[in-house]
Every structure is written in structure tokens, then in C-alpha cells.
């Protein structure tokens, strides 16, 4: 165990390093820095050479060990759940921390074609202290011609007690190595922070469903002229959705939903193409994880669908509430129903499922309903990143983004 003085010295040294070379790690990565943005041609920045990929894992400081986490194993899933629940993303005021459930993590990380060695953990004395994940995706970039098999990176987390050990860059390098070894050379990820170089900067919007609770947990605040009663009245919703034929998605809808979704996403500059198997995985309803509702017209024709996922936040210190129940807009395809009406029904359905707030990014067509349905802009920015790929246009507008990462 380091003495207090040694710890302080180590910490001071880290600070000095950061001040001298803030993005030391990121400058070693194939991400265009500001002045390269002009000179690089669109496409891969570095050609990947399989023969050059290290065959063995990166070195870890002593007592730290790599492990592949098997989320189907209850005990290992519990370890991941607890690490994230206690050490994952918090808001800037440290009032909330995401509380991804085990069922959610299995949904998010065990899609068709998953690679077991892409669920990466670091253990010390059998205790999980670090985590990072990848899932295989096929990303369509800027036009139909280019579709790239790559990885979607998520859930980078280091235990609070062992931060400033530079473990995060090693986790990133190791999962990069495990992706390269499968002859894949690109990645897509998002983050609330800004590191070199976002391809798009999107913003979160929030629609109050339970005004009283949002004020009690400190998510919303009342201005001088507002009262809780006024807020409740302002955000009140009808008991039942309005759209005829709206019902929970079932297995029999998979083929139609797949067609609707793939056709709809083509309008964006960044989007995934889904097989029916993938639609089954990502959209069939799972209690407390993903809700999908379809609009079925005469003769069983599905013309629209809406979907939102469940991501509660732990309220860190609050006498009355332990959790904030948040629904996050996922993919919504409106071909016959006006999108404002479809999303108004989404709010009603989420309210009836017990959610306190409905969150949406300003991506895809969301701008068309955010204001009209009384969403408020949040403080949360979500930046999208593409690893080892130069876009034709340096930045994409939020409405050109057709992918949602959970
Ligand atoms: C791939 N992964 C990205 C998704 C992770 N997601 C959902 C996320 N990434 C960064 C954010 F900025 C963010 N925000 C939702 C908005 C919000 O609700 N802000 C208040 C709040 C309530 N609970 C929390 C927990 C953590 C941070 C802010 N929180 C801001 N969401």
C-alpha cells in the first residue's frame, strides 16, 4: 500500500503530466487532430496490417489480470453490475449515477455475432476493477457505397479507488488489439466528454413525466413564479395513447419492422443495417429494458413504430428517492402517423410504464417533436466518435446521425 506521501507525490506527477500533454494518449491514436482535418482524404486513416497485431495481451501492472467476462454467468454479471453501479458515469454535480441493470447489460452486450473476448475485464484478487466492451456492427458511412464492419465500444469504467493509474488507456489499447486481431480497423463510440475529435456533438433533451419527483430529486428546479402544482398541470398527459392500432411489438412483426427500419435509416449519414435476427434482439420488448410499440393498420400492415429503453439513475444522496426512472428514445419510424403524434403517444406509454422523465437526443428527426412536446434542453452533451476513419465532411450535424448507442 502506498503511503499518503507517495500517493500525493504520484497524484502531483499525474497532474504535471496532464498539464504538459493533456491529450498524450489520444495523440497516439489515429484520430484526425484539428489541422489534419483539412489534409486527410476520406476513409481509413491508417491501413491495418494483420501481421503487425500483437498476439498477446498488453502488459498490466502487477496483481492486475485480464479476464473475459461471461455475462450469462450470474456471478460475473453481478460483478459487472456492481462495478458500474458504483463507478460509472455521473452528472457534473455528482447527484446521479447510471444504474444499468443486468438484464439491460445482457441486451446491450450479447447481440447476434458477439465475440466473448470483447467483454473485457481487469481483476485484482478476483475483484473486478476495470471494464470495457465492444460489439460487432456494420456501419454505413455518408453514402450507400461504404459499409464498414467495425466495433461499437462502450462501458469503459475504472473503479474510483484506482483512477490515475493510467488503466483506462490500457483498456482501450487492449480492446483495440482484440478488434484488430479480427481484421477490423474502425470503431464507433460516444462520450459525454470531449477528446480528439468528435464527428458530431449532440445534445440531450428531457420531457418531464413526473414533475413532482424531478423537483424532489433535483433533476428540475422551480423558478420564482413556478409551483409544483403548476408544473404538474403543464406536463399532464392523457391516460391513453391516441393512435389507432398502437400495440406492443410481437415476434410476428419482425419482418415488417426490419423493412421499415432499414428503409427509414437510409436518409442519414451514419446508420446500421439490421438483419431480422438483429431486429429480434434489439426491438422485441424486454421488461424493464426495451419497449417497442407498432402501429398496425387494416390487414395487419405495420406502418410505424416507436421504441425507448430503460436506464435508471441512482440518486446519490436524497432522503426520499433512491432512483430516477428515465426512458431514453431509441428508434422511431413514422411513415403514416405524424411523428409528433407518435412521440406524444410514446410519452403517454412511458408515463404509464412508470417513468419520471423521457430523454431524447437531437439526432435523426427528433428536432421535429422536441419543442412541440415540451422537451427542455439538458446540460448533457453526447459526442459521437469514429476511430480511424476520416469523414468527407469534418463534422456531421446531429440530424445526420442515425445511430443510438445505449
Ligand atoms: C453510450 N453511452 C452514452 C449513453 C450514456 N448516457 C445515457 C449519457 N451519457 C452522457 C450524458 F450526459 C447523458 N445524459 C443524459 C442526460 C441526463 O439525464 N443528465 C442528468 C443525469 C441523470 N442521470 C445521469 C447519470 C449520468 C450523467 C447524467 N445524468 C445527460 N447520458
Image (cartoon, helix red, strand yellow):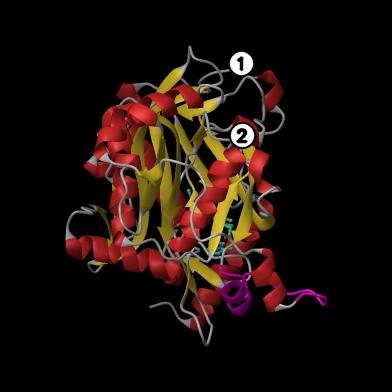
Q: Residue at x 67, y 57 (%)?
A: 378
Q: Is residue 114 above or below residue 326?
A: above
Q: Magenta: predominant secondary structure element?
A: loop
Most extreme residue toward the right is: 225
Picture quadrant where residue 96 is located:
bottom right
- Left or right side of 404 for 70: left
State ligand 1's quadrant: bottom right
- Asked if the magenta segment contains residue 245, the reply would be no
Q: Which mark is residue 356?
A: none
Q: Earlier in the sequence, mark 2 or mark 1?
A: 1
Count neighbours of disc 2 (C-alpha within 10 A) and say few if under 14, some if 14 to 19, many if 20 or more: many
Relative to the observer, which residue lies in front, 340 or 160?
A: 340
Q: Quadrant of the N terminus?
A: bottom left
- Asked if the magenta segment contains residue 215, the reply would be yes
Picture quadrant where residue 221 is located:
bottom right
Name the residue carrying label 2. 199
Q: Is mark 2 within 8 Å of ligand 1?
A: no
Give the percent coordinates (x, y) of residue 257: 37, 31
* Of the two numbered discs 2 and 1 in the rendering, the one whose residue sits closer to the viewer: 2
Count neighbours of disc 1 (C-alpha within 10 A) and say few if under 14, some if 14 to 19, many if 20 or more: few
**Looking at the image, do the residues carrying marks 2 and 1 touch, with CB atoms under 8 Å apart?**
no
Gap between marks 2 and 1, in whole Å?
15 Å
Magenta residues? 210-226
Q: Residue at x 24, y 69 (%)?
A: 125
Q: Is residue 280 above or below residue 65?
A: above
Name the residue carrying label 1. 41
Relative to the observer, which residue lies in front, 304 or 275?
A: 304
Q: Is residue 161 above or below residue 290?
A: below
Amino acid at each position: 500500500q502506498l503511503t499518503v506521501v507517495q500517493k500525493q507525490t504520484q497524484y502531483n506527477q499525474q497532474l504535471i503530466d496532464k498539464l504538459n500533454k493533456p491529450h498524450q494518449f489520444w495523440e497516439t491514436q489515429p484520430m484526425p487532430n484539428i489541422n489534419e482535418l483539412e489534409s486527410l482524404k476520406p476513409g481509413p486513416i491508417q491501413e491495418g496490417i494483420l501481421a503487425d497485431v500483437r498476439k498477446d495481451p498488453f502488459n498490466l501492472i502487477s496483481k492486475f489480470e485480464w479476464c473475459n467476462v461471461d455475462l450469462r454467468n450470474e456471478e460475473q454479471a453481478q460483478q459487472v453490475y456492481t462495478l458500474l453501479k458504483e463507478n460509472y458515469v455521473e452528472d457534473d454535480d455528482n447527484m446521479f449515477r447510471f444504474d444499468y441493470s443486468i438484464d439491460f447489460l445482457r441486451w446491450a452486450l450479447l447481440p447476434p455475432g458477439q465475440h466473448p473476448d470483447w467483454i473485457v475485464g481487469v481483476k485484482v484478487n478476483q475483484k473486478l476493477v476495470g471494464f470495457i466492451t465492444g460489439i460487432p456492427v456494420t456501419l454505413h458511412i455518408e453514402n450507400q457505397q461504404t459499409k464498414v464492419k467495425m466495433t461499437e465500444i462502450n462501458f469503459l469504467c475504472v473503479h474510483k479507488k484506482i483512477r490515475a493509474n493510467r488503466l483506462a488507456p490500457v483498456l482501450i489499447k487492449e480492446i483495440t488489439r482484440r478488434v484488430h486481431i479480427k481484421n477490423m480497423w474502425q470503431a464507433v463510440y460516444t462520450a459525454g466528454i470531449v477528446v480528439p475529435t468528435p464527428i458530431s456533438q449532440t445534445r440531450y433533451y428531457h420531457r418531464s413525466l413526473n414533475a413532482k419527483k424531478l423537483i424532489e430529486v433535483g433533476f428540475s428546479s422551480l423558478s420564482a413564479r413556478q409551483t409544483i402544482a403548476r408544473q404538474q398541470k403543464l406536463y399532464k398527459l392523457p391516460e391513453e395513447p391516441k393512435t389507432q392500432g398502437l400495440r406492443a411489438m410481437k415476434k410476428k412483426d419482425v419482418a415488417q419492422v426490419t423493412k421499415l427500419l432499414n428503409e427509414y435509416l437510409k436518409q442519414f449519414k451514419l446508420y446500421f443495417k439490421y438483419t431480422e435476427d438483429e431486429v429480434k434482439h434489439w426491438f422485441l420488448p424486454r421488461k424493464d429494458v426495451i419497449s417497442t410499440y407498432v402501429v398496425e393498420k387494416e390487414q395487419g400492415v405495420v406502418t410505424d413504430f416507436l421504441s425507448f429503453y430503460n436506464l435508471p439513475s441512482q440518486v446519490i444522496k436524497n432522503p426520499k428517492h433512491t432512483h430516477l426512472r428515465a426512458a431514453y428514445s431509441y428508434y422511431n419510424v413514422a411513415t403514416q402517423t405524424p411523428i409528433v403524434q407518435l412521440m406524444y403517444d410514446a410519452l403517454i406509454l412511458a408515463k404509464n410504464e412508470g417513468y419520471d422523465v423521457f430523454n431524447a437526443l437531437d439526432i435523426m428527426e427528433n428536432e421535429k417533436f422536441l419543442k412541440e412536446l415540451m422537451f427542455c434542453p439538458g446540460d448533457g452533451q453526447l459526442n459521437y466518435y469514429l476511430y480511424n476513419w476520416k469523414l468527407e465532411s469534418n463534422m456531421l450535424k446531429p440530424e445526420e446521425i442515425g445511430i443510438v448507442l445505449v
